[in-house]
Image (cartoon, rainbow, N blue to C red):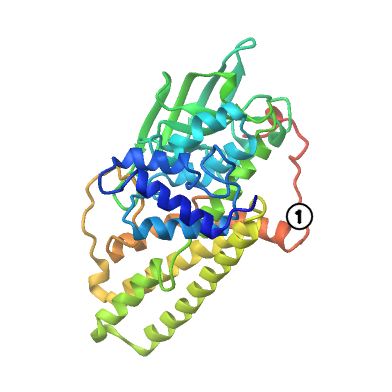
Amino acid sequence: MTVTAADLRDRVRGLLAAHPPATTDRADFLGARFDAGLAWVHYPQGLGGLGADPALQAVVDAELAAAGAPDNDPRRIGIGLGMAAPTILAYGTEEQKQRFLRPLWTGEEVWCQLFSEPGAGSDLAALGTRAVRDGEGDWVVDGQKVWTSSAHLARWAILIARTDPDAPKHRGITYFLCDMTDPGVEVRPLRQITGEAEFNEVFLTGVRIPDSHRLGEVGDGWAVARTTLMNERVAIGGARIPREGGMIGRAARTWRDRPELRTHDLHRRLLDLWVDAEVARLTGERLRQQLATGRPGPEGSAMKLAFARLNQQISGLEVEILAQDGLLYDDWTMRRPELVDFTGREAGYRYLRSKGNSIEGGTSEVLLNIVAERVLGLPAEPRDDKDVPWKDLAR
């Protein structure tokens, strides 16, 4: 049976009648919304959805927003929503889907990503964190991860580790779901140029992960991780924003509020970036529509590239518009924030924080290769490590 917009409005009305937002506990309301299939409408029934057209999610969101219903604070739980959930849906067992998707969506359990390592960032497949099977039972994990957003808040992590050092680097990796509260998991803050520590390094020492928390087949972790990475790049670069929203909106507001700082050159550059931002926004909307019937493809890498470039150029222009005021920065106090707030802070923060956009979620250099090879069909760069056992690679 095809689910229509009218069907969804009826379901929303039923949800609101049974759980009035004004008198219902926030967590209870979110749980009821998930159970009603109104969390991700395109997910299967019983997993927060109804198997509906993904485009109909906007109908549900608009109806609930108009009723003053609480959302699940998506920026705080973005890693879970944008990366862990679609990977669990694609590769998880039914038990894993039932266990993890509901508290992930309601925000009861925050997730982080244990992928990058000190010696395996851009070349992620070179990772050295080891997972060794203890007989037929648990996996014992030892290693170090780095640049882990929200690790200080997370209950769960998506983790890739090397399970076969004799195999080539892409074929000896396995994907796990790691409980961040388990013994042997140590989280240390990494202070950034902004003064904050939203990132962390994570040390894993004898961490035991049950085989029931393995996602996908042993040795197939790279394929699973690619699903995560492609979803990550769409989540970072293709987030839905209104016209003149996000960073360009803040720069345009500064321009309008400070007429005494305007020059012809700044005006021309702002217009150029406004057009670029609008093109990127519309391209992202088209990409989301194309992805509605399948998994994200390499095109998401192009969106993430555009996101990084625009954020850095727009924030740099805003600092120039503000002249000496653009050099101000409100607070260098060491903090461990729950989210990155690009538009809610001052121009100095946006300028400093955007420097990381060309690194996180895949460096711009790596993404350029992906776009060249997998979108444009250009010849791949020569590689002499593709079929060499990982243990024999120079490190």
Quarter containing the C terminus: top right
Q: Give percent across and percent down for residue 174.
A: 64, 29
Q: Residue at x 68, y 39 (%)?
A: 223
Quarter of the image where one finds residue 262: bottom left
Q: Residue at x 52, y 22 (%)?
A: 142
Is 384 left or right of 54, judged from the image as shown? right
Is any part of residue 302 visible from this angle? yes
Residue 96 location (% of width, % of height): 56, 29
Q: Is residue 292 above or below residue 24?
A: below
Q: Nearer the viewer, residue 197 or 271?
A: 271
Disc 1 secondary structure class: loop
User: Looking at this view, is 79 or 328 the one in front?
Assistant: 79
Q: x and y percent of residue 281 in the render?
A: 51, 69
**Residue beneath disc 1:** 380
Q: Is residue 304 visible?
A: no
> Could you tell me which residue is drawn at 51 percent across and 48 percent down?
40
Instruction: Say whether residue 124 is left or right of residue 260.
Output: right
Left or right: 395 in relation to 274: right
Placement of 282 over or under 216, stated as above or below? below
Of the pair 138 and 290, the residue shown nearer to us: 290
Mark 1: which amino acid?
A: Ala
Number of labels in the image equals 1
Q: Residue 53, how many percent across, how many down?
A: 60, 55
Identify which residue, 60 or 198, lies in the foreground. Answer: 60
Above/below status of 180 relative to 37: above
Q: Mark 1, residues whose alpha carbon is within 10 Å: few (<14), some, or many (≥20)?
A: few
Q: As displayed, is residue 192 above or below residue 6?
A: above
Q: Residue furthest top?
A: 135
